[in-house]
Image (cartoon, rainbow, N blue to C red):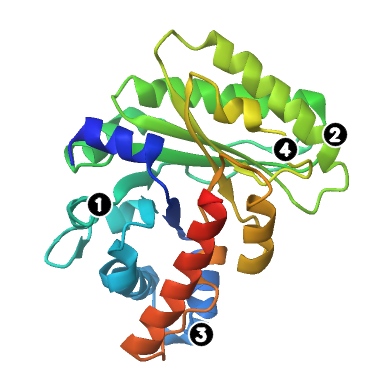
Amino acid sequence: MDFDDMRERIATGEGFIAALDQSGGSTPKALKGYGIEDGAWSGDEEMFALIHEMRQRIIESPCFGNGKVIGAILFEKTMDGESGGKSVPARLAERGIVPFLKVDKGLEDEEDGVQLMKPMPLLEEVCTRAGKKGVFGTKMRSVIKSANARGIASIVKQQFEEGKRILSTGLMPMLEPEYDIHAADRDEGEQILFEEILAHLEQLPSRSQVMLKLSIPAQSGLYAPLVKHEKVLRVVALSGGYSTEEACAKLADNPGMIASFSRGLLQDLRHGQSDTEFDETLGAAIDQIHAASVS
């Protein structure tokens, strides 16, 4: 797939985007969920080797290349690794899966009810390197904790400012201002978020597009205008801590949004499963998430 093929695949593909981008802070939790306890590694290199083995097992599973997964978000070390004897981005593209790269460097402390992204001084350099490896787009996450209008305005502004830097390198930015699903004021805050996103979309240059990765809204259908917006390539949903069943049920009530799940995809996979058990478990999750994404 070349870049235009990837754009078309993401814009029109009937499937979902797998989130395989757990980074340094979230890797131990991901490994524990996979059945590998903290004492199983010594140092970061061994830890990242174990998570890479898990990701390779997913990528090489027959069900992962069955057409229902249209994209995958990678951690930088995964992008630089190999699977099936090829670079991970090349192997994904070979299987019809569009590669994305997580580019954020973590979160600042909470202020005004939000956690902004930490500075990314080397963003253009990272994006250029990713583009040479065949990566189509990026993903970057910040978090909203409460319906603080000033905080939400600042988080959306930062996402779009960094998105413009990514666009300048030729990659497709996926903006992820996550709204904490446990926040009591989510109805009010998501309306503010929606209006801020609309305002910033109007300020994008003509013919420019971004992607949006958003929490499944408390009010079903809230983001339908974003799904149809000419400056939005695709709107994807994060599972946000919901189980696979909960996330899929809520996603099915929001036509046009497709999944980009991490926990919702991986929750039942275990290191000790046989290849047959692993593939059957992963395949069942893929089928369920795909059905919710195309319903």
| Residue that badge 4 annotates | 114
Residue 240 or 151: which is nearer the viewer? 240
Q: Amino acid at mark 3?
A: Glu
| Residue that badge 2 annotates | 188
The mark closer to the camera, 1 or 4, is 1
Q: Which tag, 1 or 3, sits closer to the chain's start?
A: 3
The mark closer to the camera, 3 or 2, is 2
Q: Which tag, 4 or 3, sits closer to the chain's start?
A: 3
- Residue at the extreme front of the image, as rendered: 295
The picture places residue 109, in percent across and down from the top left corner, at 68, 43
Measure how far apart labels 1 and 4 are at the Cα level.
36 Å
The mark closer to the camera, 2 or 1, is 1
| Residue that badge 3 annotates | 37
Q: Is residue 180 left or right of residue 94?
A: right
Mark 2 surroundings within 10 Å by alpha-carbon count, few (fewer than 14), some (14 through 19), many (20 or more): some
Q: Amino acid at mark 1?
A: Gly
| Residue that badge 1 annotates | 96
